[in-house]
Image: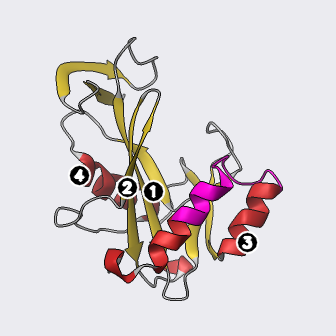
Amino acid sequence: MEILDIYDKDRRRTGKTYPRNEEIPHGGLRLIIHILIFSDKGELLIQQRADHKKMGGLWDISCGGACQMGEDSCEGARRELNEELGIDFDFSSIRPILTANFAQGFDDFYILRKNIGINELKLQKEEVKAARFASRAEVLDLLAKGEFVKYKKSFLDLLFDLNDDERFMVV
């Protein structure tokens, strides 16, 4: 069972926790991470969520999940990336490209540029059904067809635009 830290509005741990399979206590916030892996061609590694999961069967960005008790954002990103895709990357020297606040917490987004073969991935079958690289047009087409997790089109465009900006390049 995963235990998550509860944060306050200023992103400080409160010292309280809750089991992930339960509702977060009223007023509490949690820390979520997402990792986007882009190839040198500007294609995004996307994953298809396992059928039994919430939003099962839909395509999603490369990797994501909740930080567990005691983890900071970098540690959670490293664990999730290793668990879901079998990629080990040390995030301790980088910061998220952006943080989005949502009703129940904070969502850190990391962007990496990494050319990796799909056959090199070690998919966590409990979480990930399939993975592939997709262009911006392909991702937006999947979104329009209802086959991609319901992000705003403008938000996905922003993530692709941030990848194109050399100031944010992490290899």
Q: CA distance from mark 2 to mark 1?
A: 22 Å
Q: CA distance from mark 4 to mark 2?
A: 17 Å
Between discs 4 and 3, the one toward the N terminus: 4
Q: Is residue 170 visible?
A: no
Residue drawn 36% across the image and 14% down it: 27
Q: Alpha-carbon neighbours of circle 2 within 10 Å: few (<14), some, or many (≥20)?
A: few
Give x and y (percent) for residue 133.
61, 76
Between discs 1 and 4, the one toward the N terminus: 4
Residue 167 in the image: above or below residue 31: below
Segment tinted magenta in the rendering? 145-158
Between discs 3 and 1, the one toward the N terminus: 1
Of circles 3 and 1, the one toward us is 3
Between discs 2 and 1, the one toward the N terminus: 1
For badge 1, the amino acid type reads Glu
Q: Pointer 4: what residue?
A: 75
Q: Pointer 2: what residue?
A: 98
User: What mark, if any, has residue 106 been given in the picture?
Assistant: none
Q: CA distance from mark 1 to mark 4?
A: 14 Å
Instruction: Give the SS element for disc 3.
Output: helix
For badge 2, the amino acid type reads Leu
Of circles 3 and 2, the one toward us is 2
Instruction: Give the SS element for disc 2.
Output: strand
Q: Pointer 1: what residue?
A: 84
Of circles 1 and 4, the one toward us is 4
Residue drawn 17% across the image and 62% down it: 92
For badge 3, the amino acid type reads Glu
Q: CA distance from mark 4 to mark 3?
A: 31 Å
Q: Alpha-carbon neighbours of circle 1 within 10 Å: few (<14), some, or many (≥20)?
A: many
Label 2 close to label 1 by CB (< 8 Å):
no
For badge 4, the amino acid type reads Glu
Q: CA distance from mark 3 to mark 2?
A: 23 Å
